[in-house]
Amino acid sequence: MLDARIRPLIDPPLNAVGHALAKAGIAANTVTFAGLAVGLAAALAIATGHIWAGLALIIANRLLDGLDGAVARASSPSDLGGYFDIVADFAFYVSIPLAFGILDQGNTLAALVLVASFVLTGVSFLAYAVIAAKRGEETEAHGRKSFFYSTGLAEGSETIAMFIAMCIWPHCFAAMAYGYAVLCGLTIIQRSLMARAAFGD
């Protein structure tokens, strides 16, 4: 919901840094895998009780996630890079709720519900992208991407805001997880209605 609105603000500085990294010979996939390592380190930090360190690593992960696309645009974007990027994103997204579930067994059910909602939201996102690509549809609402990005109520910006809130108020994790799972469910319904309108020939 917020991603497309934030893009015009964050793209110029990211593109500037991405251009400098590309000029220095750093590949976009290198940035992607570095971001994945940092994201998984964030989950490990949270799972072992170092929540503030986890928060810092979450922010670093998102910075690297923005930079890999900027490096790709400044050099040579590839379909393989797009594949690695989305796999790394979802690996990071599911690792954070899992980490809170490991941290406190009282969070386990809420963490499982949130991970399940992420999986279903991701399926709806990728299914829409596959069919949109098959029909030759394009959009740059979320910047220039390797594949079609459909919008939704729960997107990257909202998810990161929720992760940050969970780190600041970990005792409220379960309530936040259930609430965000509902938002993910609404996103699936929203995207399904969009698919019916766009693909229901």
Image: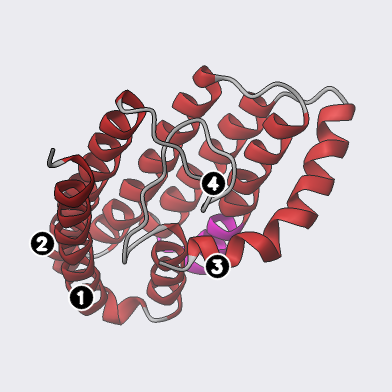
Q: Is residue 141 above or below residue 179?
A: above
Of labels 2 and 3, earlier in sequence is 3
Q: Secondary structure at mark 3?
A: helix
Q: Looking at the image, is mark 3 or mark 4 earlier in the sequence? A: 3
In the rendered image, the vertical position of residue 110 relative to residue 131, given as above or below: below
Q: Position of residue 98 (x, y in %)?
A: 27, 52
Q: Is most of the magenta stretch helix, strand or loop? A: helix
The quadrant where residue 124 appears = top left
Structural distance between the alpha carbons of marks 2 and 3: 33 Å
**Image location (x, y in percent) of residue 193:** 15, 56
Label 1 packing within 10 angstroms: few (<14), some (14-19), many (20+): some
* Amino acid at pointer 3: Arg
Give the side of residue 42 with respect to residue 67, left or right. left
Which portion, as a residue range, is magenta? 49-59
Q: Kindly identify which residue carries mark 3.
A: 5
Q: Amino acid at mark 4?
A: Glu
- Residue 54: in magenta span: yes
Q: Nearer the viewer, mark 3 or mark 4?
A: 4
Q: Residue at x 40, y 56 (%)?
A: 48
Mark drawn on residue 109: 2
